Amino acid sequence: MVDTRSGTSTTPYMPEQEAKAAAALKERRERKEAKKKALLEEQAAKLKKIEEEMARGKERLKREEEANPKAVEEDEEEEEQPLERQRAGGRGESSGTKEDLMEKKITEWVAGLSMGEVEEALMYVPREEQEVAVKEWDAEEDPLKRQVLEDEKRMEWKFRLTRERKRRMEAANQAAKELEEIKKQRDQMVTQVDLLGKMEIMARNIERLAQVQEEQFLFGRSQDIVVRSIRLGLMDFARELATQVGSEVRARLEGTERYCTGAIEGAKLTAPKSEEARPRREPVKSQISRFLQWEGGKL
């Protein structure tokens, strides 16, 4: 027993106890490291599985596209092509804050117009889901785990885009089959003699046409909503950009006008005074008539 300053007694650790405590601490640290390593391996395996699923989906989609070239051409016409703009030539340093702000706005606009695969995938993800994912990423303190979560979520969104493309292609193929079936039914209706049989064929054709039209309407409406959201953002930015450009041009015009006015006034002040105008000489005809009048009066 050892007495302390406070008057209490304590028993010092024996070498065996210290070794046991060190072993327990080491074991706890090893369990923690193993748990962290297992979590990272699990995340990597899940990410690899998603990548394999996406690769299989792309291969299946590629095979279907090769089997249906006509449907692929229609699908490619419907999809928006990414806009890429390259800035030609180098530009010098900006001389003012407005120029820097203008350059920054234009760069953001061009970057927003250049829509890659990730941006196209985000078009089909609700804003609420995006906000929840961003909050989840911000809440994660471990940068490695946060990066794994971001990659996993983006892979999931890209896979959703692949499924959406496949669904659109299948819908287009189904619509083509329905229209082909309607053509066959129309040929059968021409050869049909019974009026009741013609009415039944006509009713089936009308039902199929209505179904195809409804699917096309729903698909077009979803695309219009996505395109409208993009247009609203671009319109707001274009309006702000036009306002800034107009104010800049107006300021430059006013400065040019003041400079021209000052130059004209300075030229007037520095110009020499013009000499007095000489007396105007009379024309020759008037001098001859006056001479004749004088000679006649003299005679």
Image (cartoon, helix red, strand yellow):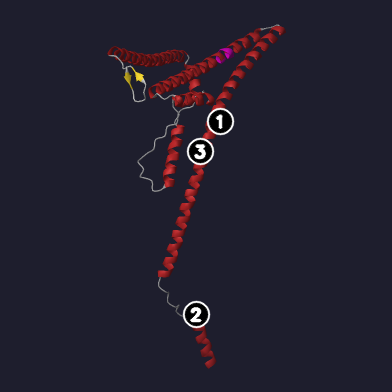
Which residue appears at 40% of the width and 69% of the height?
270
Percent x, y for residue 175? 57, 15
Work out whether 47 lies above or below 276. above
Secondary structure of the residue carrying numbered label 1: helix
Give the residue type that dot 2 points to: Lys
Residue mark closest to the camera, 3 vs 1? 3
The residue to which callout 3 is attached is 237
Q: Which residue is mark 2?
A: 285
Instruction: Say if 221 sits above or below 202 in the image.
Output: below
Res 39 quadrant in image: top left
Magenta stretch prevailing secondary structure: helix
Precedes in sequence: disc 1 or disc 2: 1
Q: Is residue 91 above or below residue 224?
A: below
Residue marked by disc 1 = 228
Horizontally, residue 92 falls left or right of residue 181, namely left
Q: Position of residue 290 (x, y in %)?
A: 51, 85
Q: Mark 3 near mark 1, Cβ–Cβ under 8 Å?
A: no
How many other residues sit within 10 Å of disc 2, few (<14), some (14-19) or many (≥20)? few
Name the element at disc 2. Answer: helix
Query: From the viewer's perspective, is the residue at label 1 or at label 2 nearer?
Result: 1
Q: How many marks?
A: 3
Instruction: Looking at this view, name the residue that lies furthest to the front.
Output: 7
Q: Amino acid at mark 3?
A: Phe
Is residue 83 or residue 248 the one in the foreground?
248
Of residues 131 and 84, the one nearer the viewer is 131
Q: Position of residue 176 (x, y in %)?
A: 55, 15
Q: Image quarter for residue 217?
A: top right
Q: Which mark is residue 261?
A: none
The stretch of residues the image draws in magenta is 175-179
Residue in the image at 58% along x and 13% along y: 178
Q: Residues within 10 Å of mark 1 (few under 14, many from 20)?
A: few
